[in-house]
Amino acid sequence: MRKYIKWQERYDSEFDKEQLRKKIGESIAEWRKCQEMSQEEIAHVLKVSKNAVGKWERGESMPPIDKSVILSELSGVSLDSMLLGRVPMVDKKIQERLENVSYKNKENLLKIIVTFLEAVKNT
C-alpha cells in the first residue's frame, strides 16, 4: 500500500494534465522549429489538420497515441521522454549525423547533448 501512495503522490505532482499538455505542446513546437518545419508540414506527415498541430502546441489538446508514436520516431526520442516533456531539441545537422548511429548509442548521445545544452542555458 505504501508503494502505491508514494507513486500516487508523484503522479499527482508530476502529471497534472493541464501542465502535461502544455509541456508536450512546448516540446512539439520547439522540436518542429528546430527542424525548420511548419505546422502544416507536420500536419501533412501525421495526416492531421494544421489546427490539430496548433492545438497540441498550445496545450489545448494532446496528440493521440498513434501520432505520438510517429512524433517519437521522427524526433528520435523515446515516447516516455516525449510524453514527460523531456524532449531534447536537436537541430537538423546533428540529427543527420546521428542517422548512422545505433539506436542505443543515439539515445546516450542525445542525453549528453541535452545535458550540455541545459548547462549552457543555465549559465
Image (cartoon, helix red, strand yellow):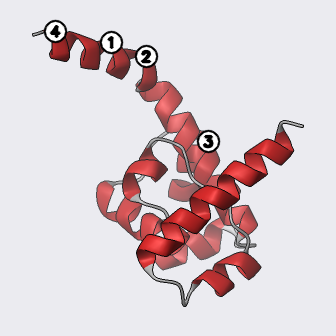
Residue type, numbered disc 4: Arg
Q: In the picture shown, does residue 66 fall above or below 92?
A: above
The percent position of residue 29, horizontal first and vertical second, equals: 66, 54
Q: Give the residue displayed 50% in from the left and 66% down from the top.
A: 107
Q: Residue 24 carries which label?
A: none
Residue ID for mark 2 = 13
Q: How far apart are marks 2 and 3 (CA)?
A: 21 Å
Q: Distance between the residues labelled 4 and 2?
A: 17 Å
Residue ID for mark 1 = 9
The residue carrying pointer 1 sits among few (fewer than 14), some (14 to 19) or many (20 or more) residues within 10 Å by Cα, namely few
Q: Which mark is residue 58?
A: 3
* Residue 109 in which image quadrant: bottom right
The percent position of residue 115, horizontal first and vertical second, equals: 68, 49
* Residue 25 in which image quadrant: top right
Residue type, numbered disc 3: Arg
* Residue 65 in which image quadrant: bottom left
Which residue is situated farthest in the left direction here? 1
The residue carrying pointer 2 sits among few (fewer than 14), some (14 to 19) or many (20 or more) residues within 10 Å by Cα, namely few
Between tags 4 and 3, which lies in front?
A: 4
Between tags 1 and 4, which lies in front?
A: 4
The percent position of residue 40, horizontal first and vertical second, equals: 63, 71
Q: How far apart are marks 4 and 3 (CA)?
A: 37 Å
Q: Give the residue displayed 31% in from the left and 63% down from the top.
A: 66
